[in-house]
Image: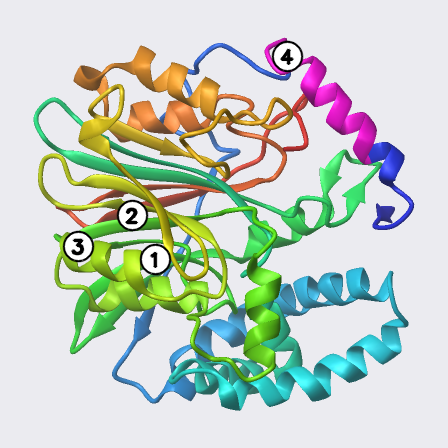
Amino acid sequence: MKNVTLGTLLLYLSLFVARSLSQDVPPYTEDCRTDAYPPSAKDIPVKTYVLNLDLPPQQRWANLAKEKAPQIKDMINSIINLVGSVVNTTEAIAFVDKEFALLADGLPAPYGDEMKGIATAANIPLGQVVLYNVFYELFTLCTSIVAEASNGTLYHARNLDFGLFLGWDVENDTWSLSEKLRPLIINVDYQSKGETVARAVHFAGYIGVLTGVKPGVLTLSMNERFQLDGGYIGFIKWLLGDHSGKWMGFFIREVLVDSISYEAAKKSIMTEELLAPAYFILGGNSSGQGCVITRSRETMDNLEEMTKTESGWFVLQTNYDNWKNAPFFDDRRTPGDKCMNRLTQNKVGLAGIYNVLSTKPVLNLLTTYTALMQVNTGYLETYIRNCPQPCFPW
């Protein structure tokens, strides 16, 4: 397998042009799916692991880290190889092992200790575990939906797309890092005193949260937002000693585990200073409770309430400001909205939303998983996704 990381500008340009020219042309796009749910054998449901929050932080992830150590090491090696395509690989490893390890002690509790526990259990240098966790703060693309059925039941689902421009496999027409990620996808049942306090989707070894449900209270997912004053700036400021911004994955985990209500979570998301800009897609447990909160690092830029959208019964968010037109080269919003409206509120449910998220180009070669959530039951079901060819890269 040949992975290309540099010298591929012409390839990416051709993909860009091809996508724009065939945005609405089959087979790279398709009519709204109605047959994707129940998922086929190719869409694999992930395993669930229990995280005991009553254990000391260094012990919480130990068993999982041991089990998934080969896959975590494989993913970390791929990340380091990407860095090594720009600088000397040996020097990159030495820098990561030394400098990133020092970051663990500066992270807010309990995250540094949890990373130390993973490093020990998986026999991976601590600096590489820290790098692995930082990596997910910077490279995610997504489509998230909160929808309310005609009987008032709320559903939340999302595709998580990861790996754009991070190693194109020219032999198999796939993103190499996206392929490495799929074996790492798991569900985690957060428990305290033997009771479930939250459920979340994780990449094994990554201790932050990007998707999750607090049973009976709320559902939450985060989508990346592109800004010049973005996550890289926040990360650099944090390295230079300004720790006022919250790490995105840690922040979502705290909101998910600690929030006592939809409104409390909403207030926290709207006001806390963050390391990166993002879209937060939040669902509650009562009729009308669904919104998209658009954040810069320091301020809230927009609040879209589900009840005030054109449909009045769903919000759908990709990676672009929802009050502006989506760019022609990456418009997942238009087909997503079309399929949701065709579904209708009377037929909305986990099956219907899964079908929407399975329709190209909402489903694409970057899509690693689809997660389905229902707040009242605390339901979380996650499927590893593979977009069948012909399928666009993003």
The earlier-in-sequence mark between 1 and 2 is: 1
Magenta residue span: 12-26
Give the residue type at disc 2.
Leu
Q: Which residue is mark 4?
A: 27
Q: Quadrant of residue 28?
A: top right
Q: Quadrant of residue 37?
A: top left
Residue 34 appears in view: no
Q: Which residue is mark 2?
A: 380
Q: Report if residue 16 lies within the magenta region.
A: yes
Q: Which residue is mark 3?
A: 215
Given contact means CB atoms under 8 Å apart, are the residues at marks 1 and 2 in contact? yes
The earlier-in-sequence mark between 4 and 2 is: 4
Place of residue 262 in the rendered image (x, y in percent of width and height, measured from the top left):
16, 53
The chosen color scheme is rainbow
Per the model, the C-alpha gap separating discs 2 and 3 is 10 Å
Per the model, the C-alpha gap separating discs 1 and 3 is 11 Å
Per the model, the C-alpha gap separating discs 4 and 2 is 31 Å
